[in-house]
Image (cartoon, rainbow, N blue to C red):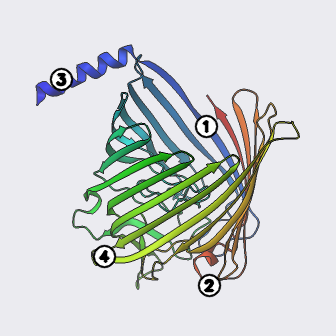
Amino acid sequence: MVAFVRILLVVVLAWAASACVHIRGSTAADIRGFVQPPRYGGQAAGHGVSLKAEPEAYAQSKDEDHTGTLRPFVRVDPIDTGRTHYDVRQADYRYRDDHWSFGIGAGLFDWGVMENHRIVDVLNQKDLVEDLDGSEKLGQPYTKVGYDGGKWSLSVYYMPFFRDRTFPGARGRLRFPAVIDTTDPFFESSLGRWHPNVAARLGVTLGEFDLGLSGFSGTSREPRFFGQLTDDEVLVGYDFLEQVSLDAQWTHGGFVAKAEGLARWWSASLRLSGAVALGLEYWLFDLGGKGVDLTFATEAYWDSRLPDQPITFYDHDIFAGLRLGLSDVGSTEFLTGAMTDWTTGFTFVRAEASRRFGQHWRMYLDLRGFVGQTTGLESALRNDHYGQLRIAYFF
């Protein structure tokens, strides 16, 4: 074994010496302010500046078959200790030839085709202190083997370790009424975080159609919550999950139709539920010959999970939005949209704008609001309308 490790180390060092190494990434300052005072005891007003850094070192062999990536992440928030955290988004080695691929380490993966929320995307854990919509993810330890047959591809994953979901702390905004205690979560598996997870995905391209058939078996990334009689904190638990899913996309000119569907068997009792997402997009390119691109998008979500299963914002909701891109020197972009629960009318509104300045700087403005009266999960956010200005430097 020792001899094997020495040989492997020599090979890695020899490859690293001949590989082309790139350093890139970004640092940013986020200035965030809330319109209304906090709703729950112990919360801070939330106004302040937090800092984040996400550098990346990327090495690739001369024949481009071997790549290695290291991408750490850190956020420092002086107000919410729950939002101050660090992670390794990616730290892996990957090999690819004409057909076969292999990867090992920690990485980020994307399944599905929807724009606003992908219901079939189950490999990575969500980083909720970075973004409430779950678009930010934690790095997932994995081993992957894949085969690319041209019009079809197959990938198989083994994931030996589970990542816990992140939540705001007691002083943080955008949180539930009770503080989420993440120090000692409950796992249905006796192996806890070390319960093995396996997944596979088959992708097929048929003309204008792109199809994906996926399966997952392991620990659910979505937690359940347990109230305590002794204090106001809430515990989290993670159960078994078996899931099969299908996603499809049809692209015809500027028109795109999307669909995702899944069946899940939750916990050791294999309780069945399902979910469906449907979406339409229409792209208008180079309006008036001025290089302006406009995209309209609408999506609908339905989920049949029962009240004692993990909760979700996307149980019966519809989204509508548009994106405007200007082909100016600053690559200016605007995005606006709203997500509405069609049973309660509660609406999440979002507007974004961004523009590049010079070669390295980019500024982002993000406005979010929560409109309507509800007694459901969304009611926790009624006082949390906020705006955020991000100033980012890319190197």
Which numbered mark, 1 or 4, is in the foreground of this view? 4
Q: In x, y percent, where is residue 179? A: 50, 72
Residue at image mark 2: 375
Q: In which quarter of the image is the C terminus?
A: top right
Which numbered mark, 3 or 4, is in the foreground of this view? 4
- Dot 1 amino acid type: Thr
The image quarter in which residue 320 lies: bottom right
Residue 270 shows which numbered tag?
A: 4
Residue at image mark 1: 27
The image quarter in which residue 12 lies: top left
Is label 3 in a helix, a strand or a loop?
helix
80 or 74: nearer the viewer = 74
Is label 1 in a helix, a strand or a loop?
strand
Is label 2 in a helix, a strand or a loop?
loop
> Is the residue under label 2 in contact with that under label 3 (CB below 8 Å)?
no
> Is the residue under label 4 in contact with that under label 1 (CB below 8 Å)?
no
Residue at image mark 3: 6
**Residue at image location 27% in from the left, 63% down from the top:** 192
The image quarter in which residue 234 lies: bottom left
Q: In x, y percent, where is residue 307? A: 46, 83
